[in-house]
Image (cartoon, rainbow, N blue to C red):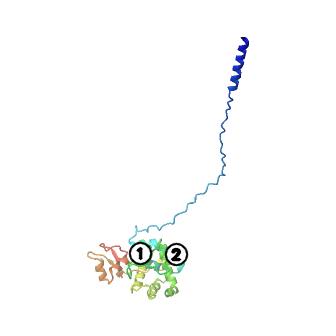
Amino acid sequence: MKKIFTIICLSVLVLSCGSRKKVVTSKTKTKTERVTRQPKTPTEEKVVIAAPKEESKPVSSGYANATEAYIANYSGIAKDEMRDYGIPASITLAQGILESGSGNGRLSVEANNHFGIKCHREWTGDKIYHDDDAAQECFRKYKHSKYSFRDHSLFLKERKRYAGLFKLAIDDYEAWAKGLKAAGYATDRKYPDKLISLIERYQLYQYDLEVLGKTPAKRPVVKNEDKHIVVAGDTLYSLSRKYNMTVKELQELNGLKSNELAIGQELYIK
């Protein structure tokens, strides 16, 4: 009996050993991705490019009229043109006042064109169309008024018919005014008188003298008969008839934007 029990125990032991499976625990390896560090690049300096400056709005307040404001705004440019091209600043300013209506004409307001310079064949810049000698003529349009003044200087300097002007004394504005008319710059027979009147009334000759480093010996006197004191009933039309002028001429000479007059107002006449 003891022998049988021993055999049974051995059988159970053998069976249990044969059925045990070896359990292998495999450690899951964490996959590590190799990260390649790029060398740091220096921080780029931020470059700020300034936008091109636009022309500041012309100053108009604080002056007696539009003509005085125009002179204040553009006398500096006229003096620069005198230094560079030998054209009296007084002549340039007087022409600008007449041809732009003291800066209030459409071409000067919308195109910065103060001298009515047309496109011509060589012009490749911006354009504006305006009724002049013919309907919808092409005129140059500038980003800044100073380029209009520069083209005016080049217009006179580069055309042979104006060569005689540059033989005149640079401080003789009367000779220049008459020389422009003689060279065919304007058809208006009163053109020289208008320029001279503006130069003397607003003392534009002082800018010529500033450039030349001179001081005026004596200022031209505006005669009493060159002025009219507005009284009740005066209109630009009645005054134009009285002094044999056009309404437009009166407006230009006095920097008037409208036909309104005030009693006691001083008007220059020619």
The picture places residue 120, in percent across and down from the top left corner, at 47, 81
Please, is residue 59 above or below residue 156 in the view? above
Name the one closer to the observer, 202 or 157.
Answer: 157
Please, is residue 179 above or below residue 84 in the view? below
Helix, strand, or loop for circle 2?
helix
CA gap, disc 2 and disc 1:
22 Å
The picture places residue 1, in percent across and down from the top left corner, at 71, 11
Crowding near pointer 2: few (<14 within 10 Å), some, many (20+)?
some
Crowding near pointer 1: few (<14 within 10 Å), some, many (20+)?
many
Q: Residue at label 1? A: 107
Name the one closer to the observer, 249 or 112.
Answer: 112
Residue at the limit of the structure toward the top, as seen here: 1
Circle 2: residue type: Asp
Q: Is residue 7 left or right of residue 70?
A: right
Query: Which quadrant is home to the C terminus?
Result: bottom left
Q: Earlier in the sequence, mark 2 or mark 1?
A: 2
Q: Residue at label 2? A: 80
